[in-house]
Amino acid sequence: LAAALLNLLSEPASLHMATVNTCAVFSTHELRRVRYKCTDDVLWKHAHPTKFWEKPLWLIPIHWIEEEHWVLAVVDVGHQQILFFDSLGVQGHGWRQDIQDIMILITRLVVLANRHQHQLHVTTEE
């Protein structure tokens, strides 16, 4: 899913460039990195090429291995919302852990962007 999105967004003829430039497409590995507590250096190395700090929408593909299914989390940075898209409406899957991991990912990305002089004004606590 992530590779398909990256491929689609890299084709200037397929989408208007203004639309393309509004989205940061992350690898499905970013959540795995968070779950396995990777270092900030590793997370930054893989995330910074997206220039996520410049994009109002962050697309995070999630692979549910047991269900053999992909879902998509869209982080709307400006509205500070997370939207989930599941084409099959899988019942019984625990979104709770995904939400917690995405919140950790968002917090770490905001801190890293600010640390690298890319100001992101996002509330990371309630």
Image (spheres, helix red, strand yellow):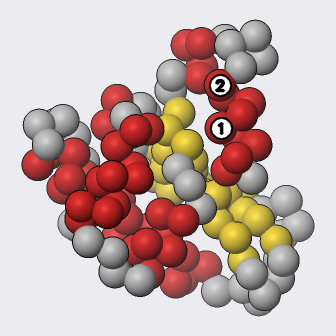
The amino acid type, in three-letter code, at marker 1 is Leu
Q: Residue at x 44, y 38 (%)?
A: 50
Residue 120 image offset from top left, x and y in percent: 22, 40
Residue closer to the observer: 10 or 89: 10
Q: Secondary structure at mark 2?
A: helix
Residue 37 image offset from top left, x and y in percent: 34, 80
Work out whether 26 lies above or below 67.
Answer: above
Q: Quadrant of residue 33?
A: bottom left
Which residue does the numbered mark 2 point to in the structure image? 10
Work out whether 13 lies above or below 78.
Answer: above
Which residue does the numbered mark 1 point to in the structure image? 6
- In the picture as drawn, the residue positioned furthest to the right comes out as 88
Compared across the picture, whether 112 is left or right of 105 comes to left
Quarter holding the C terminus is bottom left
Visible residue check, residue 13: yes
Compared across the picture, whether 37 is left or right of 123 comes to right
Mark 1 Cα shell of 10 Å, populated few (<14), some (14-19), many (≥20) = some
Q: Quadrant of residue 9?
A: top right
Compared across the picture, whether 30 is left or right of 104 comes to right
Residue 36 image offset from top left, x and y in percent: 41, 83
* Mark 2 vs mark 1, CA separation in Å: 6 Å
Work out whether 12 lies above or below 8.
Answer: above
Q: Residue at x 33, y 75 (%)?
A: 38
Q: Residue at x 78, y 87 (%)?
A: 66
Q: Are marks 2 and 1 in contact (CB under 8 Å)?
A: yes
Q: Quadrant of residue 48?
A: top left
The amino acid type, in three-letter code, at marker 2 is Ser
Q: Secondary structure at mark 1?
A: helix
Mark 2 Cα shell of 10 Å, populated few (<14), some (14-19), many (≥20) = few
How many callouts does the rendering have? Answer: 2
